[in-house]
Amino acid sequence: MRRSVSFGFAGILLGCTSTAALAQSTVQPSAPEEGGDIVVTAQKREQKIQDVPITVTALTGAKMEELGVNSLAEMAMYVPGLRIQEQSDNNPGFVIRGITSDSGSAQQGARVSIYYNGVDISRTRGAYQDTYDLERIEVVKGPQATLFGTASAVGAVNIISAQPRAGTSAGIIGSYGNYNRGQVSGFVNVGNDTLSGRLAFAYRYHDGFVRNIAGDASVPNQNQGKIKQDDLNGQDQRGLRGSLRWAPTDAITASLVLTYDGQRNPGTAFRSRALAPTGGNGGDYSYAELSGSPYSASVLGAAKLGLKRDVYDANLTLAWELAPGVTFTTVNGYRKFNSNEVFDADGGPAWYLEFAEDARGDQWSHEGRFNFSGDKYRASFGWNGFFENNLQRVPFSTEEGTYLGCSVAAAYAGVRAALAANGVSGCVAANGTVTAANATRVLTRGAATAIPYSSEFTNYGTNDTYSVFADGTYIPTPRLELTAGARLLIEQRKSGYSSVQPNSVILASLGVKSSLLGTVSTGGTIFTAQRSFTAILPRFNALYRVSDSINLYATISKGRRSPVVQLAAQTVGGVVVPNLQIVPDEVVWNYEGGIKGKIGPFTGSLGVFYQAYNGFQVSVTNNGVTTTQSAGKANNPGAEFEGNLKVGRFLQLFGNFAYVDGKIANNASYGVYSGDQFRLQPKYSASGGATLRVPAGDLIFYATPSATYQSKQYFELPNSEAISQGGYTLVNVRAGVELMQGKYRIGGFARNAFDKKYLIDAGNTGGGFGIPTYIRGEPRVYGVEVAGKF
């Protein structure tokens, strides 16, 4: 996918929350006073957001509280040019200006930087972060290598937790709603100017909103006796964060943040249009029948579909003012993640494509940065080291005859014809009967009724990155700032690959020695390959102050996604050997300019950009294995707008709009990708709403209605109308009353208030086997919320 403490009242409040971000119930330092300015650290120093000569959006904890934001995905709907797809907490897709980071392969680098308190956490299986007790989220768009390191090919999302402060304070918020939705989050802060600490927590639960009839004794089908599966697309999530701040002198501040994030969510509703559940196919928004494998516990790692994920994070930051205008900052981080997600990739009742993904990794990082500030010049330089060791293991379970009967692969056309001649046609009948369940009996002439089959492959990535960077700003007049900088990057990327792919018993009886997936087996032997790469990534910025309240800016910058040391296996002359492909780096030049400022009651920004890509990388999934290919050149023109209008004493209007027209170039040599729109990126998106706060004595009545819109998007490359989602609008609202000048609050919320039906993803692993699956978006959710701060 925020001052004595009264724990008696806190206990009464435990039991609910409408939003994760509502834990930010105290005033955040980055939230402006009425009519004030938001301060950000997008350029590694505190600046008013209008003085930053790049395109940056900041959502404070207070703003997310107003909106009722419940996850990173919801937050992104209010940021122009940003989309975050939460297929699951283990498999998020981060999209900035049409460029997606969502690959789980340990061999691939990220395109979009995700930072948590200044530390890179971009590896997707470890990147999801809950949104409780946050100070703000900054979204920087365009390549920013001197600021955010190797993965900021198109921008960065920087999540900043609330810091300990002097004094004693606490807050708690909870909610309860439909789908048995219970959420609670809060914090306790104690300390003084020298030493302070903060403990924050969140727990969220809701039942799945897609009914899963698999194993349900009340549903008559051919699969009785199977374990009863949970309903799908639910949530069972918890988080805990402890923070310490030590300032022994006015010149030195040290901060330690320890975070745990964990999920025990039920499975994702990969629903097939081709393979009907018992009772027939009711469409993308009906019930499902997904059960995994009879051997799920032993082969896939868990008896039920779902996700078990644990993430541990430690961050130590030290800032030391060496002299007036001279500061040294070091940021050090460690992150460890371990997840196992079991999923039914075929989207139907057959024991056909049952997978799991076991992802593990740890990451170490260190950065040192000197900042200098003067009347005419500002400068920074420093170094960075980032070291990660990851693996992605993908076990697979099926029944041989069912797999051969359900497969649409041309290689098995003869087998399907033989089955059809013996009365076994297709995979699943229209009423949900698994016709292919009889295939093994036919193919073995009655010698067997079921032959279990399992296999696995694992990819490994050990990546060490070293860089030095420098930025300099010249201020010839108070109105003009000119900045230039660059990062020198050295990467050592080591990839590994192993597989265990047994030959099929049935195919062997037909004289074919092959695994069912057609994947070459290394017999568990790990192949390795290593390469080193270097790059220089520059940026140039200009800021011109038209007046005290209006600024113009322009930027040119270069971004890069790392080359892929893509390693698998192949058979040459009857011998299994490594299959190594070096996919060239993806390079982008970004050109943009815009205006930021304030005119009377209106505050806003408008930016336009053009991005030119060379070696555009695309991900392709076949037989459960995702690989990267270079699709050629791509171009991406666009524009982004944000605005806020204060209307009288009690009402503010806000809105944003983005136009992103990213496409692979029209060139016949690019094959099926020629002219295709970037995946997961609508051409047009917008959001807007109003914040109403009306005081009445000691009471404050509040309401925040809002709406988000996105136009048609394609979920895959190459584009397919069957793997797309038309435009749609979602309407949300929060309203209620604050008591005792805002100390306590009671209200209600509704998200997707008109119960709009839409898809958040399509294609998926099943699409790599010729049977795409579809994941519905969240239906209408509503409930009540209460909160208190002390």
Image (cartoon, helix red, strand yellow):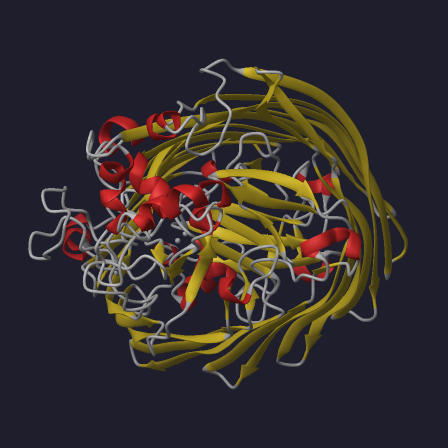
State left or right for residue 468 relative to residue 765.
Answer: right
**Residue placed farthest to the left in the image?**
218
Residue at left offset 10%, top offset 57%? 219
Residue 330 drawn at (x, y percent): 62, 28
Which quarter of the image is occupied by the C terminus? bottom left
State left or right for residue 426 relative to residue 174.
Answer: right
Q: Is residue 774 above or below residue 494?
A: below
Q: How many marks?
A: 0
In this view of the protein, can residue 204 be seen by the observer? no
Q: Quadrant of residue 580?
A: top right
Residue 247 drawn at (x, y percent): 52, 32
Residue 577 drawn at (x, y percent): 60, 16
State left or right for residue 529 relative to residue 401.
Answer: right
Q: Nearer the viewer, residue 455 or 56?
A: 455
Q: Quadrant of residue 312?
A: top left
Residue at left offset 80%, top offset 62%? 553
**Residue placed farthest to the bottom in the image?**
648
Residue at left offset 83%, top offset 70%? 546
**Residue placed farthest to the right in the image?**
476
In this view of the protein, can residue 202 be seen by the observer? yes
Residue 748 drawn at (x, y percent): 27, 72
Q: Nearer the viewer, residue 625 or 62?
A: 625
State left or right for residue 369 relative to residue 186.
Answer: right
**Residue placed farthest to the front in the image?**
421
Q: Is residue 428 above or below residue 122?
A: below
Q: Is residue 82 above or below residue 254?
A: below
Q: Nearer the viewer, residue 339 or 742?
A: 339
